[in-house]
Image (spheres, rainbow, N blue to C red):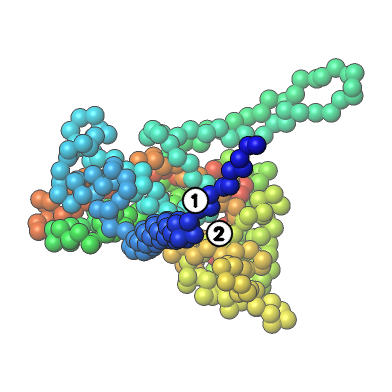
Amino acid sequence: MDSITTPILADPAEASFDIVARQDACEADIAAIRAEVTDVRQRVDRIAVAAQRPALSGGSSSPEVKGFVDGYLRRGSTLELKSITGTVPADGGYAVPREIDALIARQLTELSPIRQIAQVVQTGSAGYRKLMTLGGTASGWVSETAPRPETATPQFAEIAPPTGELFANPAASQAMLDDAAFDLEAWLGQEIAMEFARAEGAAFVSGTGTNQPSGFLAAPKNENFDEDRAFGTLQYIGSGNATGFGANPDATLIDLVHTLKAGHRQGACWVMNSGTLAEVRKLKTADGAFLWQAGLVEGQPDRLLGYPVVEAEDMPGIGANQFPIAFGNFRAGYLIAERTATQILRDPFTHKPFVHFYATKRVGGQVLDSAAIKLLKIEV
């Protein structure tokens, strides 16, 4: 008879040792995972803290900006920079990197009141051309099977905004430039934008068109309605008083609003300087109500007869034969054409020990649709 083999049981002491060993291994693995998680968390915290620190101009992530700011602006090194003039770099300077140019453009929009409301186009060349339709209806009504008669031929006018070289010349000491904590990129963008805004603010309002934009107040003006005025001529209404707004200023302003066609009143605004605005805020209707309406929500603009008011200090004040108030849709009525690239030339020699940064940009402007802007003239 076959013998029955009895299984040999493991030693209880050895089994207990294996269990303890496995537990120790698991605890070691868990401790390693926890250490890795802690290390990752610390790295993320360091990255978050670094992201909240103000960026230094020399610490820009863009090699182009870093080389331009630390190399050319701080030390005057022209290595790895390309001149946009095609001849000698000193003739026209160097093109500002796109990041700095975008910074200048953002701040310029915030500081320049007319730029905020006008139509702005970017050009790659010195000139800009646009065709405007003057009239003529190239459409009609017919039945399904009727012949199509010849339509009227529309007429066009060419818009070519006069342009000029807009320049700014901020200066810094060499000690400021040598300071690594000095945010040169932000400082330069703000200084250029402020000087550009001062210059173009006056040009967009009353520029002569000679080596500068043609301001909307420099356009021809008369009292004829849209159908009776020549293209490019603005309509105005008189105040009824030789020195002020007259006996019924609310009626005068209402008339000014409704000289603008309904399509242009969508998106229209008032433009005046702070002195004129102070007088307008005091105006009341016959029943004693103020024409001015303060914004009730933060960020909402104050309104006059339901339309927002833009303060442009370059508008003329209240005086005989002046045009202190403009009302219209400036996005349709005024065109700003600018070359996209800003150029900078570093000049450490002219005004030692200061370093000047001569920045230039080509900007033009002109009335686009003369039916979209109306003026108030102080006259009887």
Asked if the residues shown at circle 2 and circle 1 are in contact, with their CB atoms under 8 angstroms apart, the answer is: yes
- Say left or right for 31 vs 294: left
Left or right, 177 with respect to 364, comes to left
Using the numbered discs, state the Cα–Cα distance from disc 2 to disc 1 in whole angstroms: 10 Å
Query: Mark 1 — residue?
Result: 216
Q: What residue type is labelled 1?
A: Phe
Q: Nearer the viewer, residue 279 or 294?
A: 294
In the foreground, 208 or 171: 171
Determine the residue located farthest toward the bottom in the rendered image: 288
Asked whether residue 322 appears in the rendered view, the answer is no
Can you give x and y, in whole percent of width and height, for residue 259 in the image?
67, 55
Q: Where is residue 164 in the image (x, y as percent from the top left)?
A: 35, 43
**Number of disc labels:** 2
Compare residues 161 and 118 and report the one nearer the observer: 118
Residue 42 placement: quadrant: bottom left
Q: Is mark 1 on a helix, strand or loop?
A: helix
| Position of residue 185 measured from the top left corner of the image (x, y, whole percent) | 29, 54
Q: Is residue 100 visible?
A: yes
Residue at image coords 50%, 53%: 10
* Mark number, residue 194: none
Estimate how packed mark 2 is, as few (under 14), some (14 to 19) or many (20 or more) residues with alpha carbons within 10 Å.
Answer: many
Image position of 299 (left or right of 312): right
Name the residue beneath numbered marker 2.
Answer: 326
> Residue 16, position in %: x, y?
47, 60
What type is the residue that disc 2 sits on? Answer: Ala
